Image (cartoon, rainbow, N blue to C red):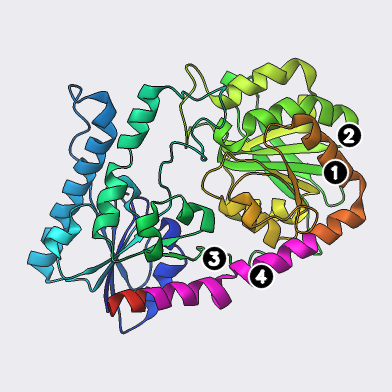
Amino acid sequence: MNILLVHQNFPGQFKHLAPVLGASADNSVVAFSMLKSPPSIPGVATVSYRPGRGTHRGTHPWVQDFESKVIRGGVAMKAARKMRDEYGFAPDVIFAHHGWGESLFLKEIWPRAKMLVYTEWYYSLHGGDIGFDPEFQENDEEALARLRLKNAHNLLSMEMADAALSPTQWQADSHPAWFRDRISVIHDGIDTRAVAPRADNPPLRLVIPADPDCAIAGGEVVLSPGEEIVTFINRNLEPYRGYHIFMRALPDLLRRRPQAKVVIVGGNETSYGARPETGTWKQRFLDEVRPDIDLSRVYFPGKIPYSAFLALMQMTTVHVYLTYPFVLSWSLLEAMACGAAVVASDTAPVREAVTEGQTGRLVGFFEKERLIDTVCELLEDREQRQHLGAAARRHIVEHYDLRTRCLPRQLALINEVASL
């Protein structure tokens, strides 16, 4: 089968699927990516494309987002035409993460190809992330109008899609009712062989980069098994992932647990939502609580290697995960696979993975005092932590395991789409 994988930051959600497809002698696999040097995967030929321009300053601000997607789609279309005309490549199935627009015009090049789209997010005027946190979000009529237009590329992609995949049921259900019967709910998968508890955790050394904006000199910290460690991890530190809630909980948490060490992992950029007017979200909320916390017990290692992340999840005493009603982070499921005791926000789609009192603890996103109480309760109760961590791992193995559940279903879906 000829397969085209499309992801702006390839491999992205295809990181497990692409090597399996490429390893089959029966497949010819090509990946489109906007990265200058996409990762090399055996059996997968990668094609890079780069837009030659950005959005025009004269474009109406409400449609600039759509223009950016059309620009990417046009560049990807040129790359597709070259693959067709110069190399004779014609995919049987195009599997595309369509969120950035690259797949908008690929059917113009390959009209007979079947289109499978990764439906990660459909913008909702109500019930999702928009308006959830009034401290940082506009919710006036113009903001809602801009939001409605952000679904233009989603609607065009759904119109041309033969089938779709969503990683959680809640993300699937956010899409229009007329499209939902085309969506299969299949998670990307967790490699529970590699992501697992470890009984003999060695000390973990983390480098703390200097951050002049936050008055952090840098250095390193060594975490040892048996220490009281609270972790908070996201790609970037921002309100969408509850960074402000966690930081505002720190003064009382550190006061009540004088031996606790807190590790906050994440970058200074903004992945989701608006950027701060000045500085970074990390700086803003650290400055807000700085006078009331002991920074000698709070560590900001930035973005860390995956191996260090796993070691940290295997060692953590309590892991905190907060999010708006939004896409679910792999880090939560990987923490659970490592047997971590998790305190998470009682928001969608977290509730699909965490059941209160069974596979973790759930607290309201804005319930700072309850968050503090629950973390302290778990830090005090070793038996409860062990029970929750073991149950969390069993849940991930049963429902999210890469090899026994997710990958076989993804491969079956591709074969099904090819036969339509």
User: Closer to the camera, 1 or 44?
Assistant: 1
Label 2 CA crowd tier, 10 Å (few <14, some 14–19, many 20+): some
Judge whether residue 395 is colored magenta. Answer: yes
Q: Which residue is mark 4?
A: 397
In the displayed image of the protein, which residue is found farthest to the front?
178
Label 3 CA crowd tier, 10 Å (few <14, some 14–19, many 20+): many
- Alpha carbon distance from label 4 to label 2: 33 Å
| 4 or 2: tag closer to the N-terminus | 2
| 2 or 3: tag closer to the N-terminus | 3
Q: Which residues are magenta?
A: 389-413
- Alpha carbon distance from label 2 to label 3: 35 Å
The location of residue 122, given as percent across then percent down, is: 40, 46
Where 249 falls versus 30 (above or below)? above
| 1 or 2: tag closer to the N-terminus | 1
Q: Which residue is mark 1?
A: 228
Q: Which residue is mark 3?
A: 189
